[in-house]
Image: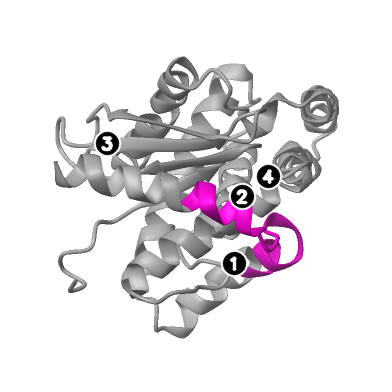
Amino acid sequence: MSDEQRLRLGGMALANGLLVHGPTHWAAAVRARDGSVSVASGPKPQLRGRGPQIPGLRGLAGLAEALVVIPRVRRALPEARLPFESPAVVLTGAAAAFGATRLRRRGSEVGALALSFVPSLVALSSGDVAAYHGAEHKTIGAYETGTEDHTKEHDRCGSHLMAPLLAANLVGAALLRRAAVKPGPAVSGAVSLASMGAAIEVFAWSERHAGTRTARALRRPGHELQRLLGTREPTTAQLEVGRAALDEILRVEQA
């Protein structure tokens, strides 16, 4: 299969499986409590194709597509466990939100932003999520490259949003201070959305210019996050679940 014929796939590690996004459909596979592999799939909402393709907004539309799919996965696979459902992640999220609010009141936007990443890091490192994250990269990477194996790190992982998202949030906070605007919840939310849209545009630029020194520098923090914390070498059983999700997305997309 040529590179032009290969689908552009994305994924999300679950606590007991893998969710894969294709151009028009999603597919998920999970390891059930009895040891069997359950698979489900369905069409994706198409939000990016509606309206003008405005930089920043198109990335947020793509993110919204991915988020809207999650309830559909839970309905189709009730046994699927999301990485943010563990008690440790819930408690960490509540503590991080409280701490970030206190830090913002003291004018420490950098500290508040750093705290906002903590729940995601806890989710990635808890249970089998990191191993299924590795299975996601190895499965999709092997499909994309046409090889039998791939590293547990991937160039298109969402971890590469970390550096541009951090930079965009800091720029937004600096602009608010310069404008002497006291950021309330609405303003803070708008800045967060704008920062995420900008980070996604930088992410896309890095993919289009992967061979440049700037793109490699932007991806470096994400690679290190994947290598040290976000991914773990999956077991044979976890790779089996990853391949089941891949086979299902290829089936529904080609149908």
**C-alpha gap between disc 1 and disc 4:** 13 Å
Marks 4 and 3, how far apart in space? 23 Å
Q: Amino acid at mark 3?
A: His
Which residue occupies the foreground of this view, 123 or 163?
A: 123
Q: Quadrant of residue 164?
A: bottom right
Give the mark nearest the N terminus, 3 or 1: 3
Tell me, yes or no, whether the two marked residues, 2 and 1, touch with CB atoms within 8 Å: no
- Secondary structure beneath dot 2 equals helix
Q: Residue at x 63, y 27 (%)?
A: 81
- Mark 3 highlights which residue? 25
* Residue for point 14% across, 41% down: 255
Q: Position of residue 138 (x, y in %)?
A: 51, 64
Callouts 2 and 3 close, C-beta under 8 Å? no
Q: Which residue is mark 4?
A: 129
Callout 1, which amino acid?
A: Lys
| Residue matched to label 2 | 132
- Structural distance between the alpha carbons of marks 2 and 3: 20 Å
Residue type, mark 2 in image: Tyr
Residue 5 visible? The answer is yes
Q: Quadrant of residue 58?
A: top left
Q: Quick one: 88 or 181, which is closer to the camera? A: 88
Residues in magenta? 223-242
Q: Does residue 23 appear in this view?
A: no
Task: Characterize the magenta stretch by its predominant secondary structure.
Answer: helix
Please tell me the numbered disc located at residue 152. Answer: 1
Q: Residue at 42% x, 69% y: name it.
A: 142
Callout 3 crowding tier (Cα within 10 Å): few <14, some 14–19, many ≥20? some
Tell me the SS state at disc 1: loop
**Percent coordinates x, y for residue 26 in the rendering:** 34, 36
- Left of 208 or right of it: where is 33? right
Q: Are marks 2 and 4 in contact (CB under 8 Å)?
A: yes
Q: Amino acid at mark 4?
A: Val
